[in-house]
Amino acid sequence: EFSNMKLTFGKNEKLKSRKAFDELFSDGKTFVSHPIRFVYKIKPKADYNIRVGVSVGKKKFKHAVDRNLLKRRAKEAYRLNKLLLEPNENYSVDLVMIYTSTKHQPFEKIEEAIKTLLPKLNEAIQTKKD
């Protein structure tokens, strides 16, 4: 039923600005499902529906290759399951997915966590009241 929606993760869906990240960390809300933590902020409608960033701690994974691998896994899991989120015409969402485990988790495990978290986030978006 979603065949017309492309499972892409394009530039316009990425959360890149330092300012947006800082804002999330200072006053974002969170959901956790091991090994992923969502930190999100629902904002008045901007020119996007949702922007997503991924963060893997340097303290836990010293090598960039490891961090990048985990970020790729998280991004891919998001890309494949992002249809669990329905856009809300009144709000935009900024989201950072933070990898919380100290070990490498297989893609399946990461995807499972993201599949648990997306519906929760969706509910928060859909039931948002000012």
Image (cartoon, rainbow, N blue to C red):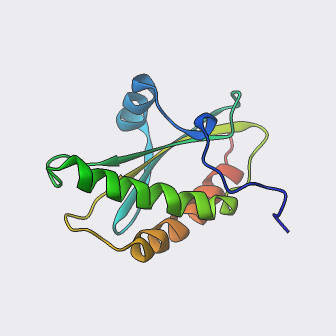
Residue visible at 74% across and 54% down in the picture = 6
Q: Is residue 4 left or right of residue 36?
A: right
Picture coordinates of residue 72, whole percent (x, y): 42, 55
Q: Residue furthest top?
A: 19
Seen in the picture, residue 20 relative to 4 is either above or below; the reply is above
Say which of 121 and 5 sits in front: 5
Say which of 76 and 112 sits in front: 76
Q: Is residue 92 left or right of residue 106?
A: right
Picture coordinates of residue 60, whole percent (x, y): 16, 55
Residue visible at 45% across and 26% down in the picture = 17
Residue visible at 68% across and 57% down in the picture = 7
Residue visible at 74% across and 48% down in the picture = 87
Q: Quadrant of the N terminus?
A: bottom right
Q: Residue furthest front?
A: 65
Quadrant for residue 121, please give it: bottom right
Q: Is residue 82 left or right of residue 101?
A: right
Seen in the picture, residue 54 relative to 111 is either above or below; the reply is above
Seen in the picture, residue 119 relative to 62 is either above or below; the reply is below
Picture coordinates of residue 59, whole percent (x, y): 14, 48
Picture coordinates of residue 68, whole percent (x, y): 32, 51
Q: Is residue 14 left or right of residue 44?
A: left
Q: Quadrant of the C terminus?
A: top right
Q: Is residue 61 visible?
A: yes
